[in-house]
Image (cartoon, helix red, strand yellow):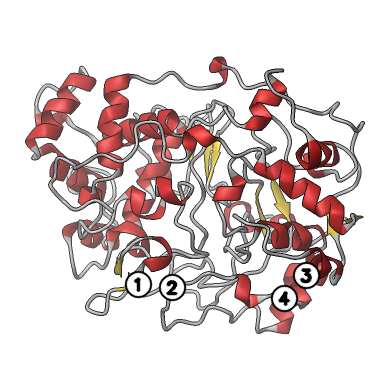
Amino acid sequence: MGLVMKTSQICAVLCVFTLPLVGPVMGQLLPNAVMDDDYVVTDAAEVRLGQLLFYDAILSGNQNISCATCHHPTLGTADGVSLSIGDGGIGLGVNRVVDPNNPPKERIPRNAPALFNLGASEFTVMFHDGRLEADPAHPSGLRSPMDADMVQGFTTVLSAQTMFPVLSRDEMAGSYRENDIALAVRQGRIAGTDGAWNLLSRRVAVVPDYAIMFAEVYPHVNVPEDIAFTDISNALAAFMAFEWRSDTSPFDAHLRGQTDLTGAALAGMDLFYGDAGCVACHSGAFQTDHDFHVMGVPQIGPGKSATFEDHHRDEGRFRVTGNADDLYAFRTPSLRNVALTGPYGHAGGHSDLMAFVVDHGNPVAALTRFDRTQVVLPAFEVEDFSVMDDPSQVAAIADAVLFDPVILSAGDVIKIVAFLQSLTDPVLKLGRLGIPSSVPSGLPLP
Protein backbone atom coordinates (compact mmCIF):
# COMPACT_ATOMS: atom_id res chain seq x y z
CA MET A 1 0.00 0.00 0.00
CA GLY A 2 1.41 3.39 -0.95
CA LEU A 3 1.66 6.37 1.35
CA VAL A 4 -1.03 8.34 -0.43
CA MET A 5 -1.33 11.12 2.16
CA LYS A 6 1.08 14.00 1.65
CA THR A 7 2.89 15.49 4.63
CA SER A 8 0.93 18.71 4.15
CA GLN A 9 -2.32 16.74 4.42
CA ILE A 10 -1.19 15.11 7.64
CA CYS A 11 -0.29 18.47 9.11
CA ALA A 12 -3.78 19.71 8.30
CA VAL A 13 -5.20 17.47 11.02
CA LEU A 14 -4.22 16.94 14.64
CA CYS A 15 -1.39 14.45 14.30
CA VAL A 16 -1.57 12.13 17.28
CA PHE A 17 -1.21 8.48 18.17
CA THR A 18 -2.53 6.18 20.87
CA LEU A 19 -2.42 5.83 24.62
CA PRO A 20 -0.23 7.14 27.41
CA LEU A 21 3.51 6.59 27.44
CA VAL A 22 4.61 3.20 28.70
CA GLY A 23 7.98 1.93 29.81
CA PRO A 24 11.44 2.70 28.46
CA VAL A 25 12.20 3.80 24.93
CA MET A 26 14.65 2.85 22.18
CA GLY A 27 13.64 -0.73 21.70
CA GLN A 28 13.82 -1.97 25.27
CA LEU A 29 10.26 -3.27 24.97
CA LEU A 30 10.96 -5.26 21.82
CA PRO A 31 9.51 -8.77 21.86
CA ASN A 32 11.60 -11.88 21.62
CA ALA A 33 12.13 -13.34 18.16
CA VAL A 34 9.46 -15.83 17.09
CA MET A 35 10.49 -19.47 17.52
CA ASP A 36 9.19 -22.78 16.15
CA ASP A 37 7.85 -23.61 19.60
CA ASP A 38 5.47 -20.66 19.36
CA TYR A 39 3.40 -22.51 16.74
CA VAL A 40 1.28 -25.64 16.68
CA VAL A 41 2.80 -28.61 14.88
CA THR A 42 1.14 -29.48 11.57
CA ASP A 43 1.00 -32.63 9.47
CA ALA A 44 1.76 -32.31 5.75
CA ALA A 45 -1.11 -34.54 4.60
CA GLU A 46 -3.61 -32.75 6.83
CA VAL A 47 -2.35 -29.38 5.57
CA ARG A 48 -2.79 -30.48 1.95
CA LEU A 49 -6.34 -31.64 2.67
CA GLY A 50 -7.11 -28.35 4.38
CA GLN A 51 -5.73 -26.40 1.42
CA LEU A 52 -8.22 -28.04 -0.93
CA LEU A 53 -11.13 -27.47 1.46
CA PHE A 54 -10.15 -23.83 1.94
CA TYR A 55 -10.50 -23.11 -1.77
CA ASP A 56 -13.51 -25.38 -2.35
CA ALA A 57 -16.97 -23.81 -2.51
CA ILE A 58 -18.49 -27.14 -1.42
CA LEU A 59 -18.64 -25.80 2.15
CA SER A 60 -21.10 -23.03 1.26
CA GLY A 61 -24.84 -23.51 1.13
CA ASN A 62 -25.17 -22.71 -2.55
CA GLN A 63 -21.68 -24.02 -3.38
CA ASN A 64 -20.70 -20.65 -4.78
CA ILE A 65 -18.31 -19.24 -2.17
CA SER A 66 -15.26 -20.65 -0.40
CA CYS A 67 -13.17 -19.53 2.55
CA ALA A 68 -10.75 -18.03 0.03
CA THR A 69 -13.41 -15.73 -1.41
CA CYS A 70 -13.07 -13.43 1.59
CA HIS A 71 -9.56 -14.54 2.62
CA HIS A 72 -7.55 -14.61 -0.57
CA PRO A 73 -3.74 -14.72 -0.62
CA THR A 74 -3.54 -12.10 -3.37
CA LEU A 75 -5.42 -9.72 -1.07
CA GLY A 76 -3.44 -10.15 2.13
CA THR A 77 -5.62 -13.11 3.26
CA ALA A 78 -8.61 -10.75 3.33
CA ASP A 79 -10.50 -9.29 0.37
CA GLY A 80 -9.43 -5.67 0.00
CA VAL A 81 -12.84 -4.12 0.72
CA SER A 82 -14.27 -2.50 3.81
CA LEU A 83 -17.18 -4.93 4.15
CA SER A 84 -17.47 -8.09 2.11
CA ILE A 85 -20.27 -9.42 -0.04
CA GLY A 86 -20.56 -13.11 0.71
CA ASP A 87 -23.30 -15.32 -0.68
CA GLY A 88 -25.01 -13.46 -3.49
CA GLY A 89 -21.83 -11.96 -4.89
CA ILE A 90 -19.84 -12.58 -8.07
CA GLY A 91 -16.12 -11.98 -8.46
CA LEU A 92 -13.26 -11.28 -6.04
CA GLY A 93 -12.10 -8.35 -3.96
CA VAL A 94 -12.86 -4.86 -5.23
CA ASN A 95 -14.24 -6.43 -8.40
CA ARG A 96 -16.87 -8.45 -6.54
CA VAL A 97 -20.40 -7.35 -7.43
CA VAL A 98 -23.89 -8.22 -6.30
CA ASP A 99 -25.49 -11.05 -8.27
CA PRO A 100 -28.61 -9.41 -9.74
CA ASN A 101 -30.35 -12.80 -9.86
CA ASN A 102 -29.57 -13.64 -6.24
CA PRO A 103 -28.71 -10.49 -4.24
CA PRO A 104 -27.75 -10.81 -0.57
CA LYS A 105 -29.79 -9.10 2.09
CA GLU A 106 -26.85 -7.23 3.63
CA ARG A 107 -23.12 -6.81 3.45
CA ILE A 108 -21.12 -8.90 5.91
CA PRO A 109 -21.14 -6.64 8.98
CA ARG A 110 -17.43 -6.66 9.84
CA ASN A 111 -14.20 -6.34 7.92
CA ALA A 112 -12.67 -9.67 6.91
CA PRO A 113 -9.70 -10.23 9.26
CA ALA A 114 -6.29 -11.38 8.05
CA LEU A 115 -5.19 -14.95 8.79
CA PHE A 116 -1.49 -14.50 9.54
CA ASN A 117 0.00 -16.45 12.47
CA LEU A 118 -3.29 -17.84 13.75
CA GLY A 119 -1.46 -21.11 14.22
CA ALA A 120 0.62 -19.54 16.98
CA SER A 121 -0.42 -20.94 20.35
CA GLU A 122 -1.01 -17.49 21.85
CA PHE A 123 -4.02 -16.91 19.58
CA THR A 124 -6.78 -18.21 21.85
CA VAL A 125 -9.45 -15.59 21.03
CA MET A 126 -11.18 -15.28 17.65
CA PHE A 127 -13.28 -12.65 15.88
CA HIS A 128 -13.40 -8.89 16.38
CA ASP A 129 -15.57 -9.28 19.49
CA GLY A 130 -13.85 -12.37 20.93
CA ARG A 131 -17.06 -14.39 20.98
CA LEU A 132 -15.02 -17.58 20.57
CA GLU A 133 -12.36 -18.25 23.20
CA ALA A 134 -10.35 -21.17 24.46
CA ASP A 135 -11.71 -22.20 27.87
CA PRO A 136 -10.18 -25.29 29.51
CA ALA A 137 -12.98 -25.31 32.09
CA HIS A 138 -15.61 -25.96 29.41
CA PRO A 139 -16.25 -29.60 28.33
CA SER A 140 -15.48 -28.69 24.73
CA GLY A 141 -12.45 -26.61 25.74
CA LEU A 142 -14.10 -23.59 24.18
CA ARG A 143 -16.49 -20.79 25.10
CA SER A 144 -18.78 -19.85 22.23
CA PRO A 145 -22.28 -18.58 21.43
CA MET A 146 -23.26 -22.10 20.37
CA ASP A 147 -23.71 -23.19 24.00
CA ALA A 148 -25.50 -26.57 23.99
CA ASP A 149 -24.87 -27.04 20.26
CA MET A 150 -21.12 -26.80 20.75
CA VAL A 151 -19.52 -30.12 19.84
CA GLN A 152 -16.23 -31.63 20.94
CA GLY A 153 -13.40 -32.62 18.65
CA PHE A 154 -11.98 -29.27 17.49
CA THR A 155 -8.21 -29.45 18.00
CA THR A 156 -7.76 -25.69 18.41
CA VAL A 157 -9.76 -22.49 18.69
CA LEU A 158 -8.64 -21.78 15.12
CA SER A 159 -10.38 -24.97 14.05
CA ALA A 160 -13.55 -24.07 15.92
CA GLN A 161 -13.86 -20.64 14.30
CA THR A 162 -14.65 -22.29 10.96
CA MET A 163 -18.03 -23.41 12.26
CA PHE A 164 -19.44 -19.87 12.20
CA PRO A 165 -19.09 -18.62 8.58
CA VAL A 166 -20.77 -21.75 7.17
CA LEU A 167 -23.84 -21.01 9.32
CA SER A 168 -24.11 -17.33 8.39
CA ARG A 169 -26.72 -16.44 5.79
CA ASP A 170 -24.78 -13.53 4.35
CA GLU A 171 -21.37 -15.19 4.56
CA MET A 172 -21.61 -18.77 3.26
CA ALA A 173 -24.98 -20.37 4.04
CA GLY A 174 -27.29 -18.34 1.81
CA SER A 175 -31.07 -18.20 2.10
CA TYR A 176 -33.13 -20.97 3.66
CA ARG A 177 -35.22 -20.95 0.49
CA GLU A 178 -32.21 -21.99 -1.58
CA ASN A 179 -30.46 -24.96 0.05
CA ASP A 180 -30.67 -27.58 2.78
CA ILE A 181 -27.80 -26.12 4.82
CA ALA A 182 -29.43 -22.73 5.22
CA LEU A 183 -32.80 -24.36 5.90
CA ALA A 184 -31.29 -26.41 8.71
CA VAL A 185 -29.79 -23.25 10.22
CA ARG A 186 -33.11 -21.46 9.92
CA GLN A 187 -34.83 -24.31 11.75
CA GLY A 188 -32.19 -24.36 14.49
CA ARG A 189 -30.70 -27.67 13.40
CA ILE A 190 -26.97 -27.11 13.84
CA ALA A 191 -25.46 -30.17 15.50
CA GLY A 192 -26.71 -33.76 15.28
CA THR A 193 -27.33 -36.08 12.35
CA ASP A 194 -29.78 -33.71 10.64
CA GLY A 195 -27.87 -30.55 11.51
CA ALA A 196 -26.13 -28.13 9.17
CA TRP A 197 -22.63 -29.27 10.09
CA ASN A 198 -23.41 -32.91 9.39
CA LEU A 199 -25.12 -32.05 6.11
CA LEU A 200 -21.92 -30.30 5.01
CA SER A 201 -19.86 -33.29 6.10
CA ARG A 202 -22.01 -35.62 4.00
CA ARG A 203 -21.47 -33.38 1.00
CA VAL A 204 -17.73 -33.68 1.40
CA ALA A 205 -17.86 -37.41 2.16
CA VAL A 206 -19.49 -38.33 -1.17
CA VAL A 207 -16.59 -36.80 -3.14
CA PRO A 208 -14.29 -39.83 -3.77
CA ASP A 209 -11.00 -37.93 -3.53
CA TYR A 210 -12.01 -36.35 -0.23
CA ALA A 211 -13.13 -39.69 1.18
CA ILE A 212 -9.71 -41.18 0.40
CA MET A 213 -7.78 -38.23 1.82
CA PHE A 214 -9.77 -38.09 5.07
CA ALA A 215 -9.21 -41.81 5.61
CA GLU A 216 -5.49 -41.33 5.09
CA VAL A 217 -5.25 -38.35 7.46
CA TYR A 218 -7.58 -39.38 10.30
CA PRO A 219 -7.33 -42.95 11.71
CA HIS A 220 -10.93 -42.89 13.00
CA VAL A 221 -12.31 -42.43 9.48
CA ASN A 222 -12.87 -45.98 8.26
CA VAL A 223 -15.74 -45.20 5.89
CA PRO A 224 -16.79 -41.84 4.39
CA GLU A 225 -19.73 -41.64 6.78
CA ASP A 226 -17.21 -41.28 9.64
CA ILE A 227 -16.13 -37.85 8.40
CA ALA A 228 -17.30 -35.23 10.90
CA PHE A 229 -17.43 -31.47 10.57
CA THR A 230 -14.73 -31.25 13.24
CA ASP A 231 -12.45 -33.20 10.88
CA ILE A 232 -13.12 -30.66 8.14
CA SER A 233 -12.43 -27.82 10.58
CA ASN A 234 -9.25 -29.41 11.89
CA ALA A 235 -7.89 -29.79 8.37
CA LEU A 236 -8.73 -26.18 7.55
CA ALA A 237 -7.00 -25.02 10.72
CA ALA A 238 -3.89 -27.08 9.96
CA PHE A 239 -3.70 -25.47 6.53
CA MET A 240 -4.14 -21.92 7.82
CA ALA A 241 -1.58 -22.50 10.57
CA PHE A 242 1.00 -23.73 8.06
CA GLU A 243 0.19 -21.56 5.08
CA TRP A 244 0.27 -18.18 6.80
CA ARG A 245 2.89 -18.58 9.47
CA SER A 246 4.63 -15.23 9.12
CA ASP A 247 7.97 -14.75 10.84
CA THR A 248 10.39 -13.83 8.06
CA SER A 249 9.79 -10.10 7.74
CA PRO A 250 12.56 -7.49 7.99
CA PHE A 251 11.44 -6.91 11.58
CA ASP A 252 11.92 -10.61 12.34
CA ALA A 253 15.41 -10.44 10.82
CA HIS A 254 16.12 -7.48 13.09
CA LEU A 255 14.96 -9.36 16.18
CA ARG A 256 17.15 -12.32 15.24
CA GLY A 257 20.19 -10.14 14.70
CA GLN A 258 20.39 -11.08 11.03
CA THR A 259 19.81 -7.67 9.41
CA ASP A 260 19.18 -4.41 11.25
CA LEU A 261 16.35 -2.08 10.45
CA THR A 262 17.62 1.30 9.32
CA GLY A 263 16.39 4.78 8.49
CA ALA A 264 12.71 5.61 8.92
CA ALA A 265 11.78 2.03 9.81
CA LEU A 266 14.26 1.98 12.71
CA ALA A 267 13.11 5.39 13.90
CA GLY A 268 9.49 4.24 13.64
CA MET A 269 10.26 1.11 15.64
CA ASP A 270 11.73 3.22 18.44
CA LEU A 271 8.62 5.39 18.45
CA PHE A 272 6.30 2.38 18.35
CA TYR A 273 8.00 0.72 21.32
CA GLY A 274 8.79 4.00 23.04
CA ASP A 275 7.31 7.48 23.13
CA ALA A 276 4.32 6.80 20.86
CA GLY A 277 3.03 4.17 23.27
CA CYS A 278 1.73 1.85 20.53
CA VAL A 279 3.06 -1.12 22.48
CA ALA A 280 0.49 -0.50 25.21
CA CYS A 281 -1.94 -2.50 23.05
CA HIS A 282 0.20 -3.83 20.22
CA SER A 283 2.59 -5.83 22.37
CA GLY A 284 4.16 -9.25 22.07
CA ALA A 285 5.63 -11.15 19.15
CA PHE A 286 2.67 -10.40 16.87
CA GLN A 287 1.89 -6.83 18.02
CA THR A 288 -1.30 -7.66 19.88
CA ASP A 289 -2.24 -8.00 23.53
CA HIS A 290 -5.31 -10.05 22.48
CA ASP A 291 -7.41 -7.75 24.62
CA PHE A 292 -10.32 -5.43 23.85
CA HIS A 293 -10.12 -1.65 23.64
CA VAL A 294 -12.39 1.23 22.68
CA MET A 295 -10.60 3.04 19.86
CA GLY A 296 -13.52 4.99 18.40
CA VAL A 297 -13.25 3.77 14.84
CA PRO A 298 -16.04 4.69 12.39
CA GLN A 299 -19.06 2.40 12.13
CA ILE A 300 -20.33 1.69 8.64
CA GLY A 301 -22.55 -0.99 7.17
CA PRO A 302 -25.29 -3.08 8.78
CA GLY A 303 -23.74 -3.39 12.23
CA LYS A 304 -24.32 -6.40 14.48
CA SER A 305 -27.85 -7.08 15.62
CA ALA A 306 -30.19 -9.92 16.46
CA THR A 307 -33.01 -10.84 14.09
CA PHE A 308 -35.52 -8.93 16.21
CA GLU A 309 -33.39 -5.76 16.30
CA ASP A 310 -33.49 -2.97 13.74
CA HIS A 311 -30.36 -0.86 14.04
CA HIS A 312 -26.95 -0.53 12.39
CA ARG A 313 -24.84 -0.27 15.55
CA ASP A 314 -21.92 -2.54 16.30
CA GLU A 315 -21.35 -2.50 20.04
CA GLY A 316 -18.40 -4.88 19.85
CA ARG A 317 -17.35 -6.81 22.93
CA PHE A 318 -20.44 -5.62 24.81
CA ARG A 319 -22.59 -8.03 22.78
CA VAL A 320 -20.53 -10.87 24.24
CA THR A 321 -20.12 -9.78 27.86
CA GLY A 322 -23.07 -7.45 28.53
CA ASN A 323 -20.61 -5.26 30.43
CA ALA A 324 -21.18 -1.56 29.76
CA ASP A 325 -17.44 -0.94 29.94
CA ASP A 326 -17.13 -3.08 26.80
CA LEU A 327 -19.37 -0.89 24.65
CA TYR A 328 -17.62 -0.31 21.30
CA ALA A 329 -14.55 -2.29 22.39
CA PHE A 330 -12.90 -4.53 19.81
CA ARG A 331 -10.00 -6.97 19.88
CA THR A 332 -6.52 -5.62 19.21
CA PRO A 333 -5.52 -7.00 15.80
CA SER A 334 -2.08 -8.34 15.06
CA LEU A 335 -0.12 -5.93 12.88
CA ARG A 336 1.85 -8.54 10.95
CA ASN A 337 1.62 -7.75 7.21
CA VAL A 338 -0.63 -4.81 8.07
CA ALA A 339 0.45 -2.93 4.94
CA LEU A 340 -1.24 -5.70 2.90
CA THR A 341 -4.47 -6.05 4.85
CA GLY A 342 -6.41 -2.80 4.46
CA PRO A 343 -9.04 -1.47 4.80
CA TYR A 344 -8.57 -1.04 8.54
CA GLY A 345 -10.86 -1.03 11.56
CA HIS A 346 -13.60 -3.50 12.47
CA ALA A 347 -15.80 -2.00 9.73
CA GLY A 348 -13.02 -1.10 7.31
CA GLY A 349 -13.45 2.64 7.65
CA HIS A 350 -9.95 3.48 6.35
CA SER A 351 -8.31 2.18 3.20
CA ASP A 352 -5.02 4.05 3.66
CA LEU A 353 -2.64 2.99 6.42
CA MET A 354 -1.19 6.44 7.04
CA ALA A 355 -4.64 8.00 7.26
CA PHE A 356 -5.65 5.32 9.73
CA VAL A 357 -2.61 5.95 11.94
CA VAL A 358 -3.39 9.67 11.96
CA ASP A 359 -7.06 9.14 12.90
CA HIS A 360 -6.39 6.22 15.26
CA GLY A 361 -4.58 8.44 17.72
CA ASN A 362 -7.31 11.03 18.16
CA PRO A 363 -10.52 9.20 17.24
CA VAL A 364 -12.87 11.68 18.88
CA ALA A 365 -11.68 14.46 16.60
CA ALA A 366 -11.39 12.05 13.68
CA LEU A 367 -15.03 11.01 13.96
CA THR A 368 -16.13 14.58 13.31
CA ARG A 369 -14.15 14.73 10.05
CA PHE A 370 -14.59 11.16 8.88
CA ASP A 371 -13.50 10.88 5.24
CA ARG A 372 -15.94 8.59 3.44
CA THR A 373 -13.64 8.36 0.44
CA GLN A 374 -11.54 6.03 2.62
CA VAL A 375 -14.31 3.44 2.48
CA VAL A 376 -14.07 0.73 -0.20
CA LEU A 377 -17.49 -0.82 -0.85
CA PRO A 378 -18.75 -2.72 -3.91
CA ALA A 379 -21.93 -1.12 -5.26
CA PHE A 380 -24.98 -2.34 -3.35
CA GLU A 381 -28.25 -0.51 -2.69
CA VAL A 382 -28.17 -0.63 1.11
CA GLU A 383 -27.75 1.99 3.82
CA ASP A 384 -24.06 2.09 4.74
CA PHE A 385 -23.69 5.34 6.70
CA SER A 386 -26.76 5.52 8.93
CA VAL A 387 -24.64 5.50 12.11
CA MET A 388 -22.20 8.13 10.85
CA ASP A 389 -25.16 10.27 9.73
CA ASP A 390 -26.62 10.20 13.27
CA PRO A 391 -24.88 12.70 15.59
CA SER A 392 -26.17 10.94 18.70
CA GLN A 393 -24.66 7.62 17.67
CA VAL A 394 -21.35 9.21 16.70
CA ALA A 395 -21.34 10.93 20.11
CA ALA A 396 -21.97 7.60 21.85
CA ILE A 397 -18.92 6.08 20.14
CA ALA A 398 -16.82 9.13 21.01
CA ASP A 399 -17.98 9.13 24.64
CA ALA A 400 -16.76 5.56 25.07
CA VAL A 401 -13.17 6.58 24.26
CA LEU A 402 -11.29 7.12 27.52
CA PHE A 403 -7.61 7.41 26.62
CA ASP A 404 -5.68 10.64 26.19
CA PRO A 405 -3.91 11.04 22.85
CA VAL A 406 -0.16 11.40 22.47
CA ILE A 407 0.80 14.16 20.05
CA LEU A 408 3.19 13.20 17.24
CA SER A 409 4.54 15.21 14.34
CA ALA A 410 3.75 14.43 10.72
CA GLY A 411 7.28 13.10 10.38
CA ASP A 412 6.75 10.74 13.32
CA VAL A 413 3.64 9.29 11.67
CA ILE A 414 5.61 8.66 8.49
CA LYS A 415 8.28 6.85 10.53
CA ILE A 416 5.71 4.70 12.31
CA VAL A 417 4.17 3.67 8.99
CA ALA A 418 7.67 2.83 7.69
CA PHE A 419 8.08 0.53 10.67
CA LEU A 420 4.68 -1.05 10.05
CA GLN A 421 5.77 -1.77 6.50
CA SER A 422 8.79 -3.63 7.90
CA LEU A 423 6.30 -6.16 9.28
CA THR A 424 5.51 -7.28 5.71
CA ASP A 425 6.77 -10.82 5.12
CA PRO A 426 7.86 -11.33 1.48
CA VAL A 427 7.56 -15.11 1.81
CA LEU A 428 3.86 -14.83 2.57
CA LYS A 429 2.71 -12.79 -0.42
CA LEU A 430 0.94 -15.83 -1.93
CA GLY A 431 1.23 -18.34 0.91
CA ARG A 432 3.52 -21.33 1.18
CA LEU A 433 1.52 -23.88 -0.83
CA GLY A 434 -0.31 -21.30 -2.88
CA ILE A 435 -3.58 -21.71 -4.75
CA PRO A 436 -4.38 -25.25 -5.99
CA SER A 437 -5.03 -25.75 -9.68
CA SER A 438 -8.37 -27.42 -8.90
CA VAL A 439 -10.40 -28.88 -6.03
CA PRO A 440 -11.93 -32.38 -5.69
CA SER A 441 -15.53 -31.16 -5.98
CA GLY A 442 -14.80 -29.75 -9.43
CA LEU A 443 -16.32 -26.39 -8.44
CA PRO A 444 -14.69 -23.20 -9.74
CA LEU A 445 -11.88 -21.61 -7.74
CA PRO A 446 -12.34 -18.05 -6.44
CA gap, disc 2 and disc 3:
24 Å
Q: Quadrant of residue 431?
A: top left
Q: Earlier along the polypeptide chain: callout 3 or callout 4?
A: 3
Front residue of this view, candidates 4 and 324: 4
Q: Disc 4 marks which residue?
A: 394
**In this view, 370 is above or below 1:** below
> Residue placed farthest to the front in the image?
263
CA gap, disc 2 and disc 4:
24 Å
Amino acid type, label 3: Ala
| 353 horizontally vs 274: left or right | left
> x and y percent of residue 265 in the render?
76, 39
| 200 horizontally vs 427: left or right | left
Labels 2 & 3 near each other (Cβ < 8 A): no
Q: Disc 3 marks which residue?
A: 366
Labels 1 & 2 near each other (Cβ < 8 A): yes
Labels 3 & 4 near each other (Cβ < 8 A): no
Q: Disc 2 marks which residue?
A: 378
Residue shown at 31% from the left, 41% from the top: 435
Amino acid type, label 4: Val
Tell me the SS state at disc 3: helix
Numbered label attached to residue 97:
1
Q: Do we see residue 154 in this rendering?
A: no
Q: Do we see residue 284 in this rendering?
A: yes
Q: Earlier along the polypeptide chain: callout 1 or callout 4?
A: 1
Q: Earlier along the polypeptide chain: callout 2 or callout 4?
A: 2
> x and y percent of residue 402 in the render?
84, 58
